[in-house]
Amino acid sequence: MHDLFGEAAEQWCAIENRIRSVLSHFGYKEIRTPVLEKVEVFSDTVGEDTDIVEKQMYTLLDQGAEKLALRPEGTASFMRAIIENRLHESAALQRYYYYLPMFRHERPQKGRLRQFYQFGAELINDASAEADAEIISLLHQIYQELEVVEYEVRINSVGCEECRPRFREELKQFLRPKLSLLCEQCQKRFERSVMRVLDCKKESCQAVLKGAPLITQFLCAQCEAHHHDLKKRLTQIQIRYLEDPHIVRGLDYYCRTAFEFTSELLGAQSALGAGGRYDGLSRRFGAKPFPAVGFALGMERLVMVLTEKGKLPSERKTPFYYFAALGPNAIDLLYPIALSLKKKGIWVEMNYDKSKSLKALLKQADRSGSSFTVLVGDDEIKESNAVLKNMNTSAQEILNLGDLEAALFKKGSPIAP
Ligand code: AMP
């Protein structure tokens, strides 16, 4: 879990702003959910035998002895909130996004943290391939906007409840003779949810899976048509994609479209962002079924790629004025002016140390990166003057103390000519 401060915090903020701007251009509205949820929000929906629920959730007992979890992923919380607030009951297509911290008790490694931030977008009440293509193009646009180009868009269809049972059976038949070669966890998965074996990251399990049947060979006519339409749309809007039948996603509630944006720049944890269609999830909350599709993108991995490519937005913000107030009388005089200008939207930096020397104050002014420094000491007060120094050109000008605030406002005002 990381602290974020200084220039990095500013860079994050600039990235966040750009992402929010793309999301709002696509019509997505923010939704925020609490960091704590009842544990069942995840265990009953994401799946008891997923890594997230089985091993990675931070859980705690609250005072009423109810088990709570720190949110490990966004979609289940989002669904809980949609259903609890009955937002799905309007038949119309709706678009939401979230930007929230997630918590997973993972083994820390490059690109894998225990608290990390995800932007997620979710589109509900539309089952079409166009909705899937919109979600994929939105994620694509976010990366384009940030000038990230080194990634691949991988898509797959994981079928639906109609076509998956036959695939599960075939996969079981394929794996049964090799069961002892699978890891302990995959042996358990074999019984409970065999498709999850496909998702196992262990090389030994991946080796066993060589030559296994592919879900795409078992799609029913509707899933096949949906997948075909998605590809047609992606081609139409010029998004290059790869078909990757190995993408199944660790979570149980996906159906039809599943996709990942992967980048070799990330090393082993190559998924920049990922998502899919999860029409089956609402039923697990006891609600009437309604279609939904979405993605989640990890901020830390995005920042890693931007850092690697030297594309971090550099928007260093610096004060407009640095008030170098030399001694208590000057502080007395400049203090209310600083506050007044700040209230009017002009960034003023000021030090309140009454014993700072002129040299120390000027050094601080320099460091602050301000556009102008306003210098006032006892000598200036006697003369009823202030010195205004342009920090770029070093040119100085003398201002009258009597109307200092008005003069500074005029110079610094965002609405002044
Ligand atoms: P997931 O919710 O596992 O589908 O992950 C969606 C995205 O979140 C991934 O593509 C990553 O960018 C990011 N992500 C997932 N787990 C972590 C983690 N432990 N640390 C940092 N980023 C993560």
Image (cartoon, rainbow, N blue to C red):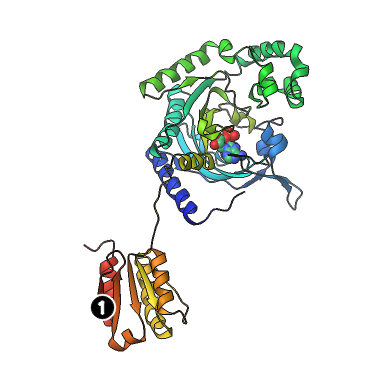
144 vs 336: above or below: above
32 vs 348: above or below: above
Horizontal side of residue 175 vs 101, given as left or right: right
Residue at the image point whose x is 50% and y is 22% from the top: 155
Camera-nearest residue between 185 and 167? 185
Residue at the image point whose x is 53% and y is 39% from the top: 301
The residue lying furthest to the front in this view is: 359
Camera-nearest residue between 288 and 407? 407
416 vs 224: above or below: below
Q: Is mark 1 within 8 Å of ligand 1?
A: no
Residue at the image point whose x is 54% and y is 35% from the top: 266
Q: Position of residue 179 (x, y in %)?
A: 76, 16
The residue lying furthest to the left in this view is: 417
Mark 1, Cα crowd under 10 Å, few <14 / some 14-19 / many 20+, is some
**What number of labels is visible?**
1
Q: Position of residue 103 (x, y in %)?
A: 63, 43
Please indicate, yes or no, whether residue 79 appears anywhere in the rendered image: no
Which element carries disc 1, helix, strand or loop? strand
Residue at the image point whose x is 48% and y is 17% from the top: 227
| Residue beneath disc 1 | 399
**Could you tell me the amino acid type at mark 1?**
Leu
Q: Position of residue 216 (x, y in %)?
A: 56, 14
Please indicate, yes or no, whether residue 125 appears anywhere in the rendered image: yes
Q: Position of residue 178 (x, y in %)?
A: 75, 14
Q: Write down which quadrant ligand 1 falls in.
A: top right
Is the C terminus in the top left, top right, bottom left or bottom right quadrant? bottom left
